[in-house]
């Protein structure tokens, strides 16, 4: 039996063997989980190759061969079924998820933005749909790429007014019910040419950090998916012997020892 790593196995299955499976609509309709609609998402990813594609993807999300090249290897079919099984799962981003330990945040504007982006990445129930993981895993296998987790420290700048650093102050007003309601007002006294008592400055991130946050979310989702697939396929292949796999959940920490999965991406029950 050929010894092989889980990444290499996925690339072999999705680029060499599974394209041999036709995109027969009746056959796809009888399959659970992913089906044709989600597989179409993979078509969009495949367009990144710069190739004009006029054929529908098969049940495994890959474009079938235009000529008959024989049956797909049984091991590849098992791999494809295992990846499709990810679509029946859901994943959660662990509470207190902090993916950028190397970033400084003295003004406290980066952490809330990370939390907001992470929340927006998930569905309304706070989970990442397993079908997204299916697309992520198949895309990485087909394009032979890994999610990019590298990111530079974002620039944080002071909020300005007419090109000058702005000052703000918190004041209070009464609403119709007589309750005290806080609001933010201009904190600079133009007449005296100085900030008023209690004035403060505000800061913002210069540019977007969405790509960086999504990159680290997808890296951890991908690593967890690889571990799940390796465990599901170990000892069940005819011609391949899977090598051990230890996920690197936080390679940005510069350590070979992964953090516990429960601290990063948790599989929902």
Image (cartoon, grey):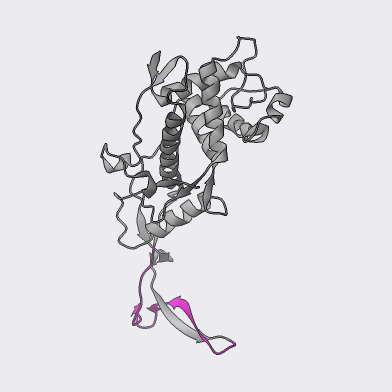
Residue 62, position as x, y percentages in the image: 59, 24
> In which quadrant is the N terminus drawn?
top left
> What's drawn in magenta, residue-wise?
176-203
In this rendering, position of residue 81 left or right of residue 148: right
In terms of depth relative to the viewer, which is nearer, 158 or 222?
222
Residue 111, position as x, y percentages in the image: 38, 57
Give above or below for 234 relative to 252: above
In terms of depth relative to the viewer, which is nearer, 262 or 23?
262
How many discs appear?
0
> In the rendered image, is residue 255 in sight?
yes
Name, please, the residue furthest toward the front: 235
> In the rendered image, is residue 147 in sight?
no
Residue 89 lies in what quarter of the image? top right
Give above or below for 262 relative to 1: below
- Residue at coordinates 44% horizontally, 56% vertically from top-left? 115
- Residue at coordinates 56% horizontally, 37% vertically from top-left? 87
- Residue at coordinates 43% horizontally, 31% vertically from top-left? 231
Residue 93, position as x, y percentages in the image: 45, 50
């Amino acid at each position: 039996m050929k010894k092989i790593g889980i990444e290499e196995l996925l690339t072999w299955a999705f680029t060499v063997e599974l394209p041999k499976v036709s995109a027969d609509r009746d056959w796809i309709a009888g399959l659970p989980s992913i089906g044709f609609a989600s597989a179409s998402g993979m078509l969009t990813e495949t367009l990144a190759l710069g190739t004009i594609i006029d054929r529908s993807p098969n049940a495994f999300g890959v474009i079938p061969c235009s000529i008959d090249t024989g049956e797909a290897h049984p091991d590849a079919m098992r791999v494809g079924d295992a990846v499709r099984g990810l679509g029946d799962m859901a994943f959660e981003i662990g509470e207190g998820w902090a993916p950028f330990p190397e970033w400084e945040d003295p003004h406290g504007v980066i952490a809330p933005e990370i939390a907001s982006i992470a929340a927006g990445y998930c569905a309304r129930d706070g989970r990442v749909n397993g079908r997204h993981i299916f697309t992520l895993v198949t895309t990485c296998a087909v394009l032979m790429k890994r999610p990019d987790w590298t990111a530079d420290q974002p620039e944080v700048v002071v909020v300005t007014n007419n090109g000058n650093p702005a000052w703000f102050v918190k004041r209070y007003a009464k609403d119709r019910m007589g309750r005290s309601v806080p609001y933010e007002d201009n904190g600079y006294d133009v007449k005296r040419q100085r900030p008023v008592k209690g004035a403060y400055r505000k800061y913002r991130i210069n540019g977007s950090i969405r790509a960086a946050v999504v990159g680290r979310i997808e890296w951890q989702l991908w690593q967890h998916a690889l571990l799940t697939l390796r465990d599901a396929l170990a000892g069940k292949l005819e011609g391949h012997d899977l090598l051990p796999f230890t996920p690197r959940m936080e390679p940005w920490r510069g350590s070979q020892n992964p953090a516990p999965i429960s601290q990063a991406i948790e599989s929902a029950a």
